[in-house]
Amino acid sequence: MRIPRPLLALSLAVALAGSAANLLAEDGYRLWLRYEPVANEALAKAYRNAIGPIVADATSDTAQIALDELERGLSGLLGNKRSRSAPKLLVGTPQSAHIAKLGLDLSELGSEGFQLAQSGKNLVIAANTDQGLLYGVFAFLRHLQSAGSLDNVPLTSTPKIDHRLLNHWDNLTRTVERSMAGASIFNWFDLPYYVEPYYHDYARACASIGINGTVLTNVNSNATVLRPQFLEKVAALADTFRPYGIQVYLTARFSAPVEIGGLETADPLDPAVIKWWSDKIDEIYTYVPDFGGFLVKANSEGQPGPQAYGRDHADGANLLARALAPHDGIVMWRAFVYDFEVKEDRHKQAYTEFTALDGRFEPNVSIQTKNGAIDFMPREPFHPLFGATPETPHTLELQITQEYLGGDIHLAYLAPMWEETLESDTFATGPGSTVAKIVDGSVFGHNLTAIAGVANIGNERNWTGHPMGAANWYAFGRLAWDHELSSEDIADEWTRLSFGNDPNTVATITKILLGSHQTVVDYSMPLGLHHIMYPGHHYGPGPWHDQGRPDWTSTYYHNASERGIGFDRTVSGSNALGQYAPEVVEKWGSPQSIEDKYLLWFHHLDWDFQMKSGNTLWNELCLTYQSGVDRVDEMLDQWSSLQGAVDAQRHARVTALLRRQLEDAKFYKDACLAYFHTFAQRPFPEGVEAPEYSLDYYKNFELYHVPGHPGEQW
């Protein structure tokens, strides 16, 4: 059953009318904000006895949204049986008399933090601002949805990172680069005349997990969005998102002064170019007074940039930063840069360019740096730039959409991968200088702190295509707010909100989630292998790809030959390892001490190299590929066991997707092993199924019109 989004309000009204509640299909549209009735009657009674009338006053649109959400949540969870004689729920800021008289210490909460507390018998949701209040309401409802006890409701929470953004790789044509969840949610052609009702639901979902910014346009976009007729469309979205605490940002095409400004140059030091950008940015703020700023991809993969004029990245970023500074806007300048003409290991190029510029950027510039140095591979060691620019802050860029992890077809919960990056120690100022503490500003004392996630959202009814894909959107928001949360706790939390609190259901789904990322790594690019996907659409294997510029091929990275496999990044090879701190070099510099998960990222080894397990490298590689396939089979069995415990619609869809994932995993394993076997020339170890077809079959297999492929139009 598909319910068009504009009819959502009518659908909900019908669904909430008595027994008609069962008519609403569990299609995933509500995400983690389901507010289903509390199933445990004893717990429901305890909630009703503790949560009585709401005492609040709404003096802003944001405060009204918070109160509406609170009423919606409590009505859904507890029905209309709350006792008016129960203790009050006091909601507000110190500007409200009923909060002011409590004498709460909110001095450490800042503008976004909140406090859940008890005052006598009354429960309290308090914050310094209405935005903090909105976050507090969502946290309180999350606690109730998760069957939390009211005995331990006291909580004080503030975000560790100030700017928490989604990056939409959405085009004005509504195609979405590297997403398989449908077309863009932004209906640009209808804006500003018609604002889709689901824009509010998008903003509400983002606010519920603390996301406070959104970059509306693709990093590879042209300059069209900077034209006045599009700025009024941007303004309509900004007006919609503002009450939810979400600022809008845009990508800035560096060549915009030439493309739409009529200038002959985009040289960042040219006075006419400086004036053009200053005027353009002033114009943007007349449309969007709280415009957040720009995300820029320049001098990378053919995108225009300052180097075309003999300038550097600092010159380019500072041009925009100086024009944005009077408006409190920021620039996020992407570190994903590599020159077509430079033959150096791509792992090294960003570090080489940006460390040389440290200290030259304006205070409102942050280098937006991917978690790893290549390109969102299924697993990468942390980027060496983290900790290497003490005078320049970094925005950590994560990819929520699964460009190299099976798109919205494969189940891959990414919080463990992000947690691995966040907890990595850079040793920048000694032990404990983790990537997380670099990003949150605590290592070098940076005031500008930001984190960004490339969105996996499209106009699919359930937003993310795969019903479990929403877990990654959710996990990104929760980690962006508090990077000390564990991937296990987030998985448990999301499962409870999305599927209910039945112990067996929660245990089964969280187990599936927590093992899923490693599973995808194992059947696609295990033991540190990387960039061996099919060219173009990136869906599926292509270890044989060797055409075109070398660093866009697979063979460049795995270096498979009769002598072994892997990329030597030690001092005997490209020495990319030398960009890390001595403590990291010591650990990763030896194949005996490095973790297996990074082994072939940094080392080229003989097929008979003895692994820590006692297996040869060839046998370990084969067994790892097989274990990835086997675990997808296990995931399918685990999910099948939930039939009847999970609603039929989502159960059927996940079942179908897991079946396809199993076939894809076999294909990935078989194609890679068939190819690598041509070099290793060793038998497949016991327990490993030999490839089903010949290598030629896999090499000649073609997928057409894969969604998200930037070379395709839907």
Image (cartoon, rainbow, N blue to C red):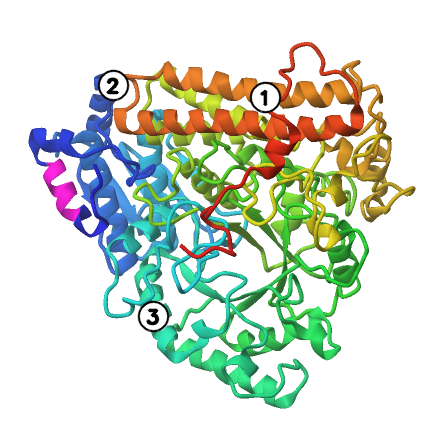
Amino acid on which disc 2 is placed: Asn
- Specify the principal SS of the magenta part: helix
Residue at x-position 54% and y-position 75%:
324
Asked whether residue 385 appears in the rendered view, the answer is no
Q: Which residues are magenta?
A: 9-16
Mark in the foreground, 1 or 2? 1
Q: Is residue 17 above or below residue 306?
A: above
Left or right of residue 460: residue 340: right
Residue at the far left in the pictured view: 18
Left or right of residue 582: residue 253: left
Residue at x-position 71% and y-position 79%:
309
Q: In this view of the protein, which residue sits in the foreground, 536 or 601?
A: 536
Determine the secondary structure under disc 2: loop
Does the magenta segment cover residue 641?
no
Residue 257: quadrant of the picture: bottom right
Left or right of residue 334: residue 201: left
Does the magenta segment cover residue 13?
yes
Q: In this view of the protein, which residue sits in the foreground, 298 or 159?
A: 298
What is the CA distance from the residue labelled 3 to the residue labelled 1? 53 Å
What is the CA distance from the residue labelled 1 to the residue labelled 2? 50 Å
Q: Is residue 383 above or below residue 488?
A: below
Q: Look at mark 2 in the image and give the residue it sits on.
A: 40
Amino acid on which disc 3 is placed: Lys
Q: Look at mark 3 in the image and give the residue it sits on.
A: 233
Q: Look at mark 1 in the image and give the residue it sits on.
A: 692
Image coords of residue 353 (percent x, y): 76, 62
Residue 666: quadrant of the picture: top right
Amino acid on which disc 1 is placed: Glu
